[in-house]
Amino acid sequence: MGRIFEVRKATMFARYDRMAKQFSRIGKEIAIAVKKGGPDPDTNPQLRRVIQNGKAVNMPKDRIEGAIKNALGKDTSNYDEVLYEGYAPHGIAILVVTATDNTTRTVANVRSHFNKGGGALGNSGSVGFLFKHMGMFKLKNEGIDMEEMELELIDAGLEEIGEDSEGNVIIRCAFNDFGTLQKALDEKNITPISTEIEWIPLNTVTVSEEQANDVMKLIARVEEDDDVQQVFHNMA
């Protein structure tokens, strides 16, 4: 019984830590979005995207509204989104998206994570060309005809459409077409489950299971950093 209790306790704390990380990430994204486009989600597509993602991870409404209000305050942290590039072990390219109010601290921490994980932090542009910057929308598959949707949205920038492992419809567009595709979905009264800005590898690299474990250890180390929002790689 004691062992079962400890396992349940560990699972509960892991779930809490994951939720806290998600809420922190959303809060920083709200601050960045408000800084760039203002506090009104109707006129700020980036903020609307972040609010949708907050709802998708069950972030309370009052916490979302509080984050928007705080972003307008004079005494709040001024976050900037900074992209770091480098290589994990075995030649795997890594992109690290951060939201930071202190780039000196963040770059030092990210470099340390790469070094301790057997990788190397590179210069801007060192691996970014290996990825495509894209917008992603996850939709509930409720009677969606994907062929029809593709024809209807191709003029709005749709480039890819498919399903994920849970049967949800995934559509992608170029980063610069994100607002256009979002508007097209709004006009069809389609509210995404969540949306993301992603870096999709143009080609993937196949490694052994042991090598993959080395890469995932570095990624896990980087993801634990409070300034890190997302990590992308080109491992198959």
Image (cartoon, grey):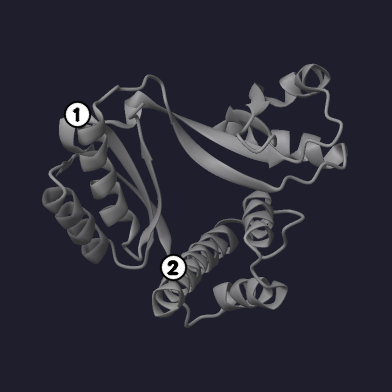
Q: Is residue 85 visible?
A: no
Q: Which mark is residue 14?
A: 2
Compared with 174, 1 (above or below) is below
- Tell me the distance, in whole angstroms, between the alpha carbons under discs 1 and 2: 31 Å
Amino acid at circle 2: Ala
Q: Earlier in the sequence, mark 1 or mark 2?
A: 2
Residue 124 is situated, as x and y percent measured from the top left of the image, at 26, 39
Residue 138 is situated, as x and y percent measured from the top left of the image, at 67, 40
Q: Is residue 61 visible?
A: yes
Most foreground residue, 166 or 20 = 166
Determine the secondary structure under disc 1: helix
Instruction: Say which residue appears at 56% left-offset and 72% top-offset.
Output: 71
Residue 54 is situated, as x and y percent measured from the top left of the image, at 63, 61
Instruction: Say which residue appears at 23% left-offset and 55% top-offset.
Output: 110
Tell me if mark 2 has few (under 14), some (14-19) or many (20+) residues whose alpha carbon lies within 10 angstroms of its own.
few
Instruction: Say which residue appears at 87% left-offset and 36% top-offset.
Output: 188
Instruction: Say which residue appears at 52% left-offset and 67% top-offset.
Output: 19
Q: Nearer the viewer, mark 1 or mark 2?
A: 2
**In-image side of 202 versus 41 (left or right):** left
Q: Which mark is residue 121?
A: none
Most foreground residue, 183 or 24 = 24
Most foreground residue, 226 or 210 = 210
- Name the residue furthest front: 1
Compared with 171, 222 (above or below) is below
- Name the residue furthest bottom: 75
Quadrant for the C terminus in the image = top left
Quadrant for the N terminus in the image = bottom left
| Residue carrying label 1 | 91
Compared with 220, 178 (above or below) is above
Most foreground residue, 118 or 228 = 118
